[in-house]
């Protein structure tokens, strides 16, 4: 599968050289490989970046900076901390410069820009500029890479915590669809949302039976895991007529642990949907993966969903 479902659409519209913006959360989540996060080097960079971007940057070398220097010596044979500090100083003033996009492969693997990615995580960026190009994926820097090279347990624990923070805070946006009612969905939905989930936009559309079936199919489809396709899905929820489409910003890591097991993803999706049904008695369908939501938005564009320049991906 190409970049979180987006590359085929981008390729068809922009040609072979692709410059775009993608949600930071989607980029972070694409670094999972076979249930293992493959870029612990970014997490260590992010730990240092948060110190450098703080209101009072440390004047002396911290433990995190020492771990960073050790990493760079072992992986690159040089000390890049001074250059990292200079880059952080520029970002502190103006943010990441979109003229220098992060290089990624069509499958979302980082090809260059690890320091900029770390700064984006630390800076709290919602989206990042990328260019999608053909290229060989860089070697993985998994947790075991650091453990095998003698990094202390304290460093490993700090990177583990940073991964949890990055997964929790770099949330992605998703689409929730439910039959339109008399009141706004925001009023009954807000009390049911987990901490950190925000309603970003509401919209109502009328769809035919055929289009309603197609939309629900898009939001249920999990293309990269054959067993998930065969798993028992919730009964069909949507019928033709007026539907309310709600854009949510998810910042809870459990919603996007796609790369670990499809069972975990299905469980979270079903529990969230069931909670809403039990509390409200309303049918609902929620897009869980980037591709599901990306494809659903593209589908809804044909029915009047508009995208404003400067908005994030929805």
Image (cartoon, helix red, strand yellow):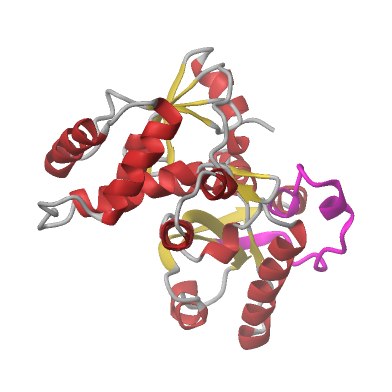
Q: Quadrant of residue 62?
A: bottom left
* Identity of the residue drawn at 55% across and 32% down: 109
* Identity of the residue drawn at 80% across and 64% down: 236
* Identity of the residue drawn at 64% across and 49% down: 36
| Span shown in magenta | 216-244
In the displayed orientation, state which residue is furthest to the front: 150
Look at the image and tell me in which quarter the N terminus lies: top right
Q: Position of residue 261 (x, y in %)?
A: 73, 57
* Identity of the residue drawn at 24% across and 30% down: 97
**Left or right of 61 in this view: 23:** right
Q: Position of residue 229 (x, y in %)?
A: 84, 51
Q: Quadrant of residue 99?
A: top left
Q: Position of residue 252 (x, y in %)?
A: 50, 66
Q: Position of residue 88 (x, y in %)?
A: 20, 40
Seen from the viewer's position, the closer of residues 295 and 67 is 67
Tell me, yes or no, if residue 292 can be seen here. Answer: yes
Q: Does 224 sit above or below residue 130?
A: below
Seen from the viewer's position, the closer of residues 261 and 242 is 261
Q: Does 16 sit above or below residue 242?
A: above
Q: Does 295 sit above or below residue 285?
A: above
Tell me, yes or no, if residue 123 can be seen here. Answer: no
**Left or right of 88 in this view: 312:** right
């Amino acid at each position: 599968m190409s970049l979180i479902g987006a590359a085929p659409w981008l390729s068809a519209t922009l040609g072979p050289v692709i410059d775009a913006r993608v949600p930071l959360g989607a980029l972070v989540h694409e670094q999972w490989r076979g249930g293992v996060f493959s870029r612990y080097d970014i997490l260590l960079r992010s730990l240092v970046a948060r110190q450098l971007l703080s209101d009072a940057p440390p004047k002396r070398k911290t433990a995190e900076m020492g771990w960073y220097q050790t990493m760079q010596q072992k992986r690159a044979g040089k000390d890049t901390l001074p250059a990292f500090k200079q880059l952080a100083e520029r970002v502190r003033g103006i943010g990441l410069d979109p003229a220098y996009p992060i290089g990624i492969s069509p499958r979302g693997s980082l090809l260059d820009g690890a320091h900029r990615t770390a700064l984006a995580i630390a800076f709290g960026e919602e989206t990042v500029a990328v260019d999608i190009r053909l290229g060989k994926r860089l070697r993985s820097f998994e947790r075991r890479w650091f453990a095998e090279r003698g990094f202390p347990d304290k460093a490993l624990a700090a990177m583990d915590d940073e991964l949890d923070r990055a997964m929790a805070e770099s949330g992605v946006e998703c689409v929730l669809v439910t039959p339109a009612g008399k009141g706004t969905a925001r009023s009954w939905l807000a009390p049911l949302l987990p901490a950190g989930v925000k309603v970003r936009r509401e919209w109502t559309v009328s769809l035919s039976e055929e289009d309603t079936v197609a939309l629900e199919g898009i939001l249920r489809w999990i293309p990269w895991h054959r067993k998930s396709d065969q798993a028992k899905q919730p009964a069909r929820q949507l019928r033709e007529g007026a539907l309310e489409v709600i854009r949510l910003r998810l910042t809870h890591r459990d919603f996007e642990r796609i790369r670990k097991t499809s069972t975990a993803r299905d469980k979270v999706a079903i529990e969230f949907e069931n909670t809403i049904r039990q509390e409200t008695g309303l049918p609902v369908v929620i897009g869980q993966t980037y591709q599901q939501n990306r494809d659903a938005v593209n589908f809804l564009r044909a029915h009047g969903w508009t995208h404003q320049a400067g908005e994030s991906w929805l």
